[in-house]
């Protein structure tokens, strides 16, 4: 009888990994996101209407997850907004994601710093945790036109990293 | 560590000997799998310094493991025609010097990976060395006909290191890449062992072709080839690769299986076909290199 040991080991390993990961790629760590194709989403806009994931319409994008209650976000947002005013991100679509915030507080937060891009309103972490698997903010995610994550930055993003991420997308 | 040469050897002989201890040819294959893995992990070109540091760390770790292997195997290397020119057989340095050299390489590899890459990569490299030296060389190689099957896992770890260097985690895709190399290893070495069967027999190493019939060995090779083909096709969906990879994996897998099938059919009619086995052996190297390089090409093409 032919039983190939290597094949048995391979099957066992695949079984073990699928048990540990529930058969799905884990997003437990943000690094795992790099290279992952993200599902599309639609959320209410902070100012009404509906905001849809930019890659569902084939646009490269940068998503900035923030909230008015988040300390590092308060430090980050003025710099991000100022950088984006000074440097046109076209053709990259910039989208904010306001996480678990009272609507009024979120609006005041972006208005104060002059962040003029669309903001999706993620009241229950549906996208923040459900799609991206984030356990904390701020997070900045750079995605290509197909919605594949190119880069993730955890924490208040320095201007240099934002510039590099945008330039990377613009030149790709 | 002192490098002291017996008077009959020149300094250049000794230096070449130390280089030979690391089995540079095996390391080449390690590089050709690691860089494309890093490109797939990063979904583009990772930073150049990260590639360079990871390769240096991985190379030193593998070189150290190979040197340990030569220290332990110097008795059988002396018996086998293929290996009797190895430095510890010719006596260009002492076993003690070689072991110290190997240990130094491992320490250096660990420090480089831990400081400039990440701890996960450093520990993966050390586990691969420990596995190769202890589980394969010391325990399995001389006792089990499945030696290369289990031992081959060490040679598959570099893709895990490459992946973790970029992402600091592991996941489905690196596990599949690991399995491809893991399943690739037995047919690769068994094909070589068909050619050098007498050598292994003389040294009492129970490689598959020594202890099993040629028919059984070549059937095993065929089974592994088909399983490997299937695994490579799973990587596409897992890593979100495109048609460049899909076509490459399909065609390369078909070719590998074709060579394996031809070898098996020759064995069925009782031909101990050494030339056919070496054809598969040489193709297996081309196969793995091409598969990984085209995987990287796929990523880079799609991102432009």
Image: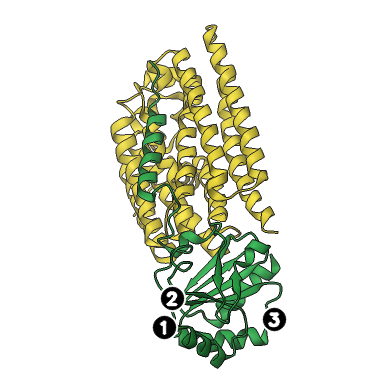
Chain colours: A green, B yellow
Is label 3 on the same chain as label 2?
yes
In the picture provided, is A38 more to the left or to the right than B65? right
Q: Please, is residue B43 above or below residue B155 in the view?
A: below
* Residue B31 appears in the picture as rendered: yes
Marks 3/1: CA–CA distance? 26 Å
The picture quadrant where one finds residue B114 is bottom left
Q: Quadrant of residue B111?
A: bottom left
Q: Residue furthest top?
A: B269
Q: Residue A70: which disc?
A: 1
Residue B152, x across and y down, in percent: 41, 36
Name the one closer to the observer, B118 or B57: B118
Tell whether label 2 touches label 1 (CB within 8 Å). yes
Res A137 label: 2
State which chain disc 2 sits on.
A
Q: Nearer the viewer, residue B290 or A132?
A: A132
Disc 1 and disc 2 on one polypeptide chain: yes
**Chain hosting mark 3:** A
Q: Looking at the figure, which quarter contains the C terminus of chain B?
A: bottom right
**Foreground residue among B98 and B171:** B171
What is the quadrant of the N terminus of chain B in the image? Answer: bottom left
SS class of the residue under badge 3?
loop
Distance between the alpha carbons at the discs numbered 3 and 2: 25 Å
- Which residue appears at 39% of the width and 69% of the height? A135
Crowding at mark 1 (Cα within 10 Å: few <14, some 14-19, many 20+) = some
Q: Is residue A89 above or below residue B304?
A: below
Q: Residue at x 38, y 58 (%)?
A: B120
- Residue at which label 3 appears: A88
Furthest toward the front, the residue is A49
> Marks 1 and 2, Cα distance to the nearest angstrom?
7 Å
Point 40% across, 30% down: residue? A6
Residue A146's disc is none
The chain containing the residue under callout 1 comes to: A
């Amino acid at each position: 009888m032919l039983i190939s040991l290597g094949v048995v080991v391979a099957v066992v390993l695949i079984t073990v990994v699928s048990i540990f990961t529930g058969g799905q790629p884990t997003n437990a760590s943000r690094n795992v996101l790099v290279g992952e194709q993200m599902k599309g989403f639609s959320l209410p806009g902070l100012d009404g209407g509906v905001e849809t994931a930019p890659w569902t319409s084939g646009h490269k994008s940068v998503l900035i997850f923030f909230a008015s209650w988040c300390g590092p976000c308060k430090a980050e947002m003025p710099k991000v907004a100022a950088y984006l005013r000074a440097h046109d991100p076209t053709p990259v679509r910039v989208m904010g994601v306001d996480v678990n915030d009272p609507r009024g507080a979120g609006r005041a937060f972006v208005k104060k710093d002059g962040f003029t891009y669309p903001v999706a309103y993620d009241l229950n972490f549906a996208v923040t945790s459900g799609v991206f698997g984030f356990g904390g903010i701020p997070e900045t995610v750079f995605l290509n036109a197909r919605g594949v994550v190119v880069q993730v930055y955890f924490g208040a993003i320095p201007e240099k990293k934002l510039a590099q991420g945008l330039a990377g997308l613009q030149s790709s | 560590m002192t490098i002291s040469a017996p008077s009959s050897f020149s300094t250049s002989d000794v230096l070449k000997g130390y280089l030979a201890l690391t089995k540079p040819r095996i390391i080449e294959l390690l590089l050709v799998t690691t860089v494309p893995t890093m490109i797939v992990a990063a979904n583009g070109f990772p930073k150049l310094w990260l590639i360079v540091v990871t390769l240096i760390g991985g190379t030193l770790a593998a070189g150290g493991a190979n040197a340990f292997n030569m220290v332990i195997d110097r008795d059988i290397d002396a018996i086998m025609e293929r290996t009797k020119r190895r430095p510890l057989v010719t006596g260009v340095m002492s076993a003690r010097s070689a072991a110290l050299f190997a240990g130094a390489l491992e320490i250096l590899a660990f420090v480089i990976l831990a400081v400039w890459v990440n701890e996960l990569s450093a520990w993966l490299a050390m586990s691969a060395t420990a596995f190769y030296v202890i589980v394969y060389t010391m325990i399995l190689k001389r006792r089990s006909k499945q030696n290369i099957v289990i031992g081959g896992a060490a040679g598959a770890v570099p893709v895990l290191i490459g992946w973790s260097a970029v992402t600091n985690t592991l996941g489905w895709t690196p596990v599949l890449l690991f399995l491809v190399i893991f399943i690739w290893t037995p047919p690769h070495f068994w094909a070589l062992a068909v050619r050098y069967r007498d050598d292994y027999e003389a040294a009492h190493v129970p490689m598959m072709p020594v202890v099993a019939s040629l028919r059984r060995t070549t059937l095993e090779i065929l089974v592994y080839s088909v399983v490997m083909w299937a695994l490579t096709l799973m990587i596409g969906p897992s890593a979100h690769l495109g048609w460049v990879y899909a076509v490459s994996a399909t065609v390369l897998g078909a070719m590998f299986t074709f060579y394996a099938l031809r070898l098996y059919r020759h064995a069925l009619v009782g031909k101990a076909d050494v030339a056919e086995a070496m054809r598969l052996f040489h193709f297996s190297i081309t196969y793995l290199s091409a598969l990984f390089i085209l995987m990287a090409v796929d990523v880079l093409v799609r991102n432009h």
